[in-house]
Amino acid sequence: MSDKLTTALQKLAISPIKADRLAIERLEKQYGASLLEITNELEDYAIVHQSIQDQRAKPKNQLIIVCCYGCLWGAVIGIATLFIKPSVTVAAIGLGFTAGVSGKLLVQRGN
């Protein structure tokens, strides 16, 4: 959206049509800044908007990462337990999953 608006404003600014140039002059006068400053501000808004969208997506990704760590540690401890004492493998997998999730959350909290 911002790229289209920026491009349209730049095209109007160099347009040979007098009405287009007058519209840009009125915009600059109303906003109190040059066209270059207006387009730079639009680009800054686009960067902020993208950053906000990235932050909204981050918690979903973090939940998946935490679950993967839990599965990894559950599998590692489950396999190790399978060779040592097979009768408690299921309990070991549950404890490994819990340890993996807890460890990852503690590391994230520390950062």
Image: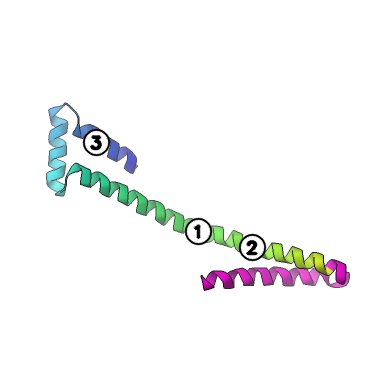
Q: Is residue 44 above or below residue 100?
A: above
Image mark for residue 7: none
Q: Which residue is mark 2?
A: 67
**For this view, does 91 lie left or right of residue 52?**
right
Q: Which residue is mark 3?
A: 10
Mark 3–mark 2 distance (CA, rounded to whole Å): 48 Å
User: Who's the residue at 17% across and 44% down the image?
Assistant: 34
Image mark for residue 58: 1
The secondary element bearing badge 1 is classed as: helix
Q: Residue 70: x percent and y percent?
A: 67, 65
Mark 1–mark 2 distance (CA, rounded to whole Å): 14 Å
Q: Residue 23: x percent and y percent?
A: 15, 36
Q: Between disc 1 and disc 3, whose residue precedes?
A: 3
Q: Residue 24: x percent and y percent?
A: 16, 38
Based on the picture, tell me whether residue 37 belongs to the magenta stretch. Answer: no
User: Who's the residue at 17% across and 32% down the image?
Assistant: 20
What type is the residue that disc 2 sits on?
A: Cys
Magenta residues span 82-111
Q: Nearer the viewer, mark 3 or mark 2?
A: 3
